[in-house]
Every structure is written in C-alpha cells, then in structure tokens.
Image (cartoon, helix red, strand yellow):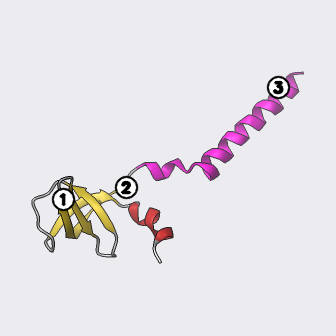
Amino acid sequence: MKNEKQIIAGGIAAAIIVMAVAVFPFWNLIPNKVTEIVKVVAVDQSGCTAETHDGFDVKIGPCNAKPGDSISASFDGKIRDREKPFTP
C-alpha cells in the first residue's frame, strides 16, 4: 500500500517535470535585458520602435528620438529567439 503511493507520487512528479521542461519552457518568460545602439525606425504615441544591429524590430518605449536616429536602448534580448522561427 505504501509502495503504491510512492509510485503514484513519483509518476505525478515526473509528469510535472516533463510538462515544465518540454511543454512550458518558463525560462522564456524571464527577460534577458540587453543594452545596445539601435536605429529608430518609427515613433508613435506609445513610444519608439527600433531596429537592432542584426535586423530585429524592438519596442523600446517612450523616447525623444526621430526615425533614423541611433540611440542606446535596453530591451529583452530573447526577442531574437522568439522571432527567429517567424523570419524567412
């Protein structure tokens, strides 16, 4: 009886571990802040959109720049990993 409970608890723990690692990679939710020189490509009421040196568009929030300006900005570096599957 006690052995059965341990087997069931182990199975549940294994299922949780598999789901946490394979199904829901939570480490993608933790931002990896990167600061680099970016080129502003658009400015609207919500802030600036800039292009990184490797061609990814990032939203950097409010800024006092004009399109074409190069500025130093911080953004989530994992945006590259998230966008790569969608870029041709």
**Tags 3 and 1 in contact by the CB under 8 Å rule?**
no
Which residue shows up at 34% across the image and 76% down it?
A: 54
Q: Give the residue number, with chain letter if any, for mark 2.
A: 32
* Vertical relation: 6 (above or below) 52: above
Q: Quadrant of residue 83?
A: bottom left
Tell me the quadrant of the picture where the N terminus can be found: top right
Q: Is residue 50 magenta?
A: no
Circle 3 crowding by C-alpha within 10 Å: few under 14, some 14–19, many from 20 = few
- Where is residue 33 drawn, in percent x and y? 32, 56
Farthest top residue in view:
1
At 18% across and 59% down in the image, what residue appears?
44
Q: Which residues are magenta?
A: 1-30
Q: Secondary structure at mark 1?
A: strand
User: Which residue is labeled 1 in the image?
Assistant: 44
Estimate how packed mark 1 is, as few (under 14), some (14 to 19) or many (20 or more) residues with alpha carbons within 10 Å: few
Amino acid bearing label 3? Lys
- Residue 45 placed where, x, y %? 17, 54
Q: Which residue is mark 3?
A: 5
